[in-house]
Image (spheres, grey):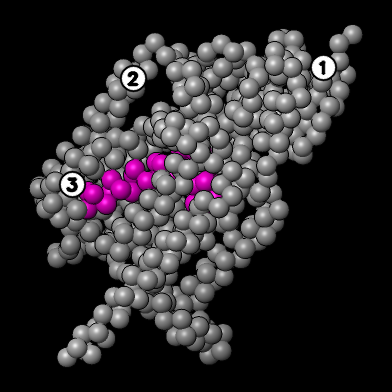
Amino acid sequence: MLAAADRSRVPKNRSIFLFALIAVLLVLASTLELESVPPVWWDEGWTMMVARNWVERGQYGQLLEGELKPPGLSADFTVVAPVALSFRLLGIGIWQGRLPGTIFNLGALLWITLLADHLYNRKVAWLTLILVILLPANEKLNPILLGRQVLGEMPAMHYLLLGYLLLYFTLRGKLIWLVPAVLMWGLALRTKAQVPPFWLGSILLPLLYCLVRQSWRQAAILAITAGGAWLAALGIVWFQAWLLEGKTLSSTGLQGYYSMSVIVPVLHVRAWALISGITFGMSVLVGLLYACGQAWKNLRRVELDEPVEIVRLALLGLACSWMAWYLLMAMYWPRFLFPALFVGCIFAAKALHDLTCGLDLPGTIRKASSVFLSRATTPSALGALLAVVLTAWYLTVSGMIFSISYPTYSSTAAAQTAFYLNTETETDALIESYESQVQFLTQRSWHYPPDQVHVQLNKRSLIDPKTPVEYDALVADPDYLVVGPSGGEWQLYEPVLGAGNFTVLKEFPPYTIYARVRK
């Protein structure tokens, strides 16, 4: 009997060991060389600057020539606050600023795996995690790389998915989880501007399902949770205003921002969005279509596990609406596509699981081969072939993108540039630049364009090359100019460089430091 008991513990011990091993590998992948992989960039710099100013000066905002200005292009308060806490505890630096994002990332990976386990089964859960990790491997789509940056995507995914998981437990009768679910969703609504409309759609779809099936208790829980989330979001706004009273300035809206990023009815933009969606998300698109078909069939079933079906519909509504927005309206930036791919991996995993008869790899290969060898056209054979094609496509795209982009994944050039400026320029020098990531690391006074110029630059580079950019780089009479990836790509400083107003002083590619030529 003892031997039998020992044998019964082996599978469980193996599962614990496997989970621990994967957890360690994910932690290492998320934290090694955190300060340089991927290179710190423009979006991160604005957020870390606000967090740094809040910690060092008690002022929540950017600094322009040493004077407080609104937070501007920084991420939202719910992203800045954890970064500021990290700065307070661990010091000011790139890895300290990125550390909270890696924690949110690991949380999001855990929640999506647990959701797949509860909504489907253990095989689908592991396959979901594999697909998520193998998302096209660049810094804008892969969660391991994206989660290493000071951005809002992974915190939003963390809060959202944990909210759905807690909703599942609440629907199971464990009402104690309702309040934490409300809080998580409230934080998600305040973390990324794109979240509220798609989250609302994800609530309305299962709510309609509950009303049609007359599941009044489940409908009430959904309505209460959703209403509570809105109140929690308003509470966070109030708390932020109370906490920062007298320490910040109100931001002004950016004219033309929505027509530049949110609703862009421009032919070449829509074409690139479609190409990106298919190239990076073919498996997810198939998974979403498959899940929609299953959901339609389930509507006619009398016996259903309603908590499972409700949360499935919520996640399906979130992923489908986000994907539709990206394909039909949004700018083709990969980060706008990422949430749809991340959540959609659950349904891609389920589709692959079913098409391969429960991940029967030898059987799947035999069935797929039979389409060509014996001209079999049965649904199972065609499904197996589709699974092979999707898997090959997924791995090929991820591998190609990683191999092409790998040489640029690691760089300390921003830190080197900042160190040179801190040690080789006058303490009262004024530096002109649009490289916020370098500004964050320096102890000098900086001048940079108004936030509205950001909209003009994006419209000129992405939509209409004839868009005027109204900015005089000499307006503040700077002593130095730093041009890096952002200023260089947007060609912001070409007029003053072409006119000979600056000369090259030092280079840390892709950054160039220029000294002012005074006549």
Residue of label 3: 177
Q: Which residues are magenta?
A: 139-168
Where is 381 relative to 156, above or below?
below
Query: Residue at image x 54%, y 50%?
Result: 145
Given residues 97 and 175, the one toward you in this image is: 97
Query: Local crowd at mark 1 within 10 Å, few (<14), some, or many (≥20)?
Result: some
Residue of label 2: 243
Q: Residue 500: which quarter of the image?
A: top right
Query: Residue at image x 68%, y 45%?
Result: 411
3D distance between C-alphas at marks 2 and 1: 41 Å
Given residues 158 and 87, the one toward you in this image is: 87
Query: Residue at image x 52%, y 14%?
Result: 69
The picture places residue 70, in percent across and down from the top left corner, at 49, 16
Q: Amino acid at mark 3?
A: Trp
Q: Residue 485: which quarter of the image?
A: top right
Q: Is residue 183 left or right of residue 277?
A: left
3D distance between C-alphas at marks 3 and 1: 60 Å
| Label 3 close to label 2 by CB (< 8 Å) | no
Membership of 161 in magenta stretch: yes
